[in-house]
Image: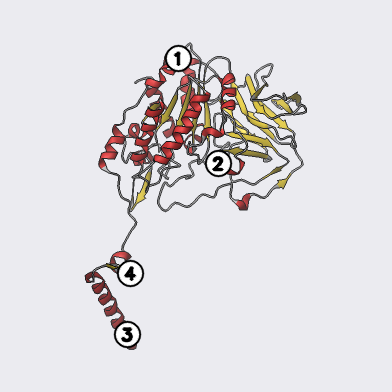
Amino acid sequence: MHKEFIKPLIIVVLAVLLVEFLARIIPAADNRFFSLKKLSWFESLKHKETVATADTSIVKKAADISHDLLPLQSFIKKLNNPSENLRIAYYGDSIIEGDLITGKLRMELQSRHQGSGVGMVGITSIVAGFRQTIGHSFSRNWESISFMSPSQNDIPLGITGYTYIPRNYYVPEKVIEPLQIDSLAVLDSAQVVSPEAPKERTRFYVDYNPWVEYRASNVAGGASTFSRIRLFYSHSSDSSYVNVSYDGAPFILRYLKNQLGVQVLDLSPVTPCKKIRLEFAANDPIHLYGVSFDELQGAYVDNYPVRGYSGMYFQRISSEILSGFQKHLNYDLIILQYGANVSHYKIRDYSYYEKGMKKSIKHIQKALPGVPVLLISAHDRCIKQGTDYVTSPDIPYLVSTQAKIAKETGCGFWNLFSAMGGLNSMPNYVNHQPPLAGKDYTHFTRAGADHIAEMLLAYLKGN
């Protein structure tokens, strides 16, 4: 270093040390003339973001919350009788996308109660390529409306949590890979751009009719052939139709009914098929809800995920639509598994969530009287603190709130947080061989989802 810089450097260093010394000894002051706060430059330079941990009593309370099977007795009675038919509507967020948890649960139930088919499937899906229990592909010119479409509140949703409308245009949407973070899994996680972002709302018009194709899948929880196929829809006109092709054969024209409420068109083939393709008129804004693949007998678990959804505001599926579907699907149990998308490490008061979820549950109970509801708690979810991953400190508060919701609405309750092992159990899932959870410390892998399904079934059986 040149000699002429040494003296100024020494002066600067001494000045910094003097300011640091004065900042430590001068008391903080706050009056109407000026505000003086304590300052420690050196400490601020080495500061790293830390997160306050949850109160130990709250952590213990959340881990010790007991499961509650009593409200589910009508379902459990049928579950314990192999000759009984069963049908479950399993709602969740990205945790169950791709038939995770539900695929394994369906397989186990069908091995005891018989049945073949995956139940209800939507028209489109952002993770269709990830799901293994059924092959699913579709054209781009569909408008898919869900709980996460705030600009479409005037359009009631189907029981899947979606309504699909044929269009002569499409809006580019990002196909999201499974296990991508949709919540605050780590403090420094990158934000996921929503497909609803304005920059992606440009319409591209096309000259072909929208279509959807389903293919049988000979894997656990799926079906090697389709024998009973039903299309659910509403808002059709006298000229509304669907063209149907089985196993690549020529299309058959089928007309839809112009009647109020949820309508069903039986598309069952004369002999079981392995593939069905449906085409609709691009300029006919009918409301489509999905296709059910099942049989008259057996057990079925319908997979109803909506990425990013909190579980609140379930009223967007009207009572009339819920009861309309119930006439045809005859559910024995409704499962609600939410929490990750309201979880935030800074929150300690989930009273707003309690209020919203109670409204959702009461809406379901009123529309489907006599059908028990099972609320599954939030699972352990970790955030990064320094070099470690620890339970997000809000999780025990959230679990406690969910237990309160279940108790005050007469729902069954399964404490998944406790079943996993409670505080800091997620790292054990991530580090397990094979991994039971992804590196986001939030989502389960397929093996992990199977493990959760096995624990859930054991709980329902009282084991």
- Earlier in the chain: of badge 2 and badge 3, it is 3
Callout 2 environment at 10 Å: few (<14), some (14 to 19), or many (20+)? some
Residue drawn at point x = 59 percent, y = 26 percent:
320
Residue bearing the label numbered 3: 8
Between marks 3 and 4 in the image, the one whose residue lies nearer the viewer: 4
Q: Nearer the viewer, residue 260 or 116?
A: 260
Residue 370 vertical placement versus 168 (above, below):
above
- Earlier in the chain: of badge 3 and badge 4, it is 3
Residue bearing the label numbered 2: 148
- Earlier in the chain: of badge 1 and badge 3, it is 3
- Earlier in the chain: of badge 2 and badge 1, it is 1
Separation of residues labelled 2 and 1 (CA atoms): 35 Å
Label 4 residue SS = loop
- The image shows residue 3 at horizontal and vertical percentages of 32, 88
Separation of residues labelled 3 and 4 (CA atoms): 38 Å
Separation of residues labelled 2 and 3 (CA atoms): 60 Å
Q: Amino acid at mark 2?
A: Met
Separation of residues labelled 1 and 4 (CA atoms): 72 Å
- Earlier in the chain: of badge 2 and badge 4, it is 4
Residue 270 vertical placement versus 8 (above, below):
above
Q: Nearer the viewer, residue 170 or 227?
A: 170
Classify residue 126 by image quadrant: top right
Residue bearing the label numbered 1: 78
Residue bearing the label numbered 4: 32
